Amino acid sequence: MVGKDNVIAADISDKKVNLPCRYEQLDVTDFKRYDEIVAEHKVDYIVHLAAILSALGERFPDRATNVNVYGCVNALNIARDRKARIFVPSTIAVFGGNHFPKVNTPVDVVLQPETIYGISKVFNENIGTYYHNKFGVDFRSIRYPGVISSEKYDFNGTTDYSTEIFFHALEKKYYKCWLGPKTDLPMIYIDDCIAGTIQFLKADGASLKRKVYNMAGISFNPEQLGASIKKMMPDFKIDYEPDFRQKIADAWPKSIDDSESKKDWGWSYDISCDELARKIMDGIHPDYKKDFKLHK
């Protein structure tokens, strides 16, 4: 069943949040509490999103291992024991090394990630597929590109510049990017990512030829995104000062082949960088934009 009355949101935070569904505080490394929530609410589809992302993971690798590996194993064991289906997202961070094509990267390539985040997600993909083959768990996973939001949040991921840049543009008319101007990476707007994920979760299992799929999004670089923002805000300026995240980005694909997703569950995504920038800007709360007249 779907609908807000049938959704249980969970997060480690104990802050009171205004959600249109029920909420439970949860540390995914706490198996007992996780299992209690699934049992109490009769959860039949676990969407396990908890993870420490790339940049934060490099600062706290032990924490990333604990959350990304042991938290996922807890979720899989609960899904197996409670007969629930489970979705665990993956990421383009699973790619790494020099033994794969970085342009139009296919789904089946050698995976040699260079971050704890990417390493943990390769484990998630493999252990989830194992639980499907061994125990019959309906496990599914999508390798997400960078996910762009119109909301301000803690920017801890390598691709997060693509959201942060908009708030700096509105607040300062200036942005110093932690990636170089020509660093092409695949991205997708969060609403489109959610719609695609729901499409995948609803797909008939008989039509799925694999447990893990690529999601391409649109590939662009900071220079191109900056140019798209400048069309809306002519006074905007951008500089570049690459930091440790540049090495992370350089190990990732420049673009993704998601033809298997299109073929097996009907995924498609067609948007330009200008259209994406406008969509992000339109979604930002009006309070951030009240001092600006944006060019159409």
Image: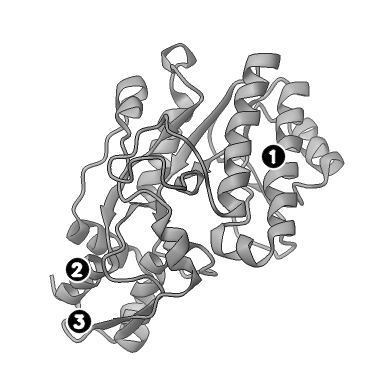
Q: Quadrant of the C terminus?
A: bottom left
Task: List the residue tagged with mark 2.
Answer: 228
**Disc marking residue 112:** none
Question: Whole-percent x and y of residue 267?
Answer: 32, 31
Determine whether 215 is above or below 173 in the image. above
Whether residue 221 is visible, yes or no, is: yes
Cα distance between the residues tagged 3 and 1:
46 Å
Of the numbered discs 3 and 2, the one sitting upstream in the chain is: 2
| Residue 9 vs residue 200, the one in the foreground | 200
Report the amino acid beneath label 3: Lys
- Quarter location, residue 36: top right
Picture residue at 71% right of the left edge, 65% below the top: 15
Q: What residue is shown at x 82% (from left), y 46% (from top)?
A: 30
Which amino acid, mark 1?
A: Cys
Q: Position of residue 202 (x, y in %)?
A: 46, 25
Tell me: 75 left or right of 225. Answer: right
The residue where tag 1 is placed is 72
Q: Would you say the residues marked 3 and 1 are in contact, meaning their CB atoms lie under 8 Å apart? A: no
Where is the N terminus found, in terms of image quarters? top right
Asked which secondary structure carries label 2, the reply is helix
Q: Residue furthest top?
A: 206
- The three-letter code of the residue at mark 2 reads Ser
Q: Residues within 10 Å of mark 2 (few under 14, many from 20)?
A: some
* Relative to 52, 230 lies left or right: left
Q: CA distance from mark 2 to mark 1?
A: 38 Å
Where in the figure is residue 104, as x and y percent of width and height? 28, 40
Is 285 above or below relative to 194? below
**Residue at horizontal 53%, vertical 47%?**
113
Q: Which residue is mark 3?
A: 293
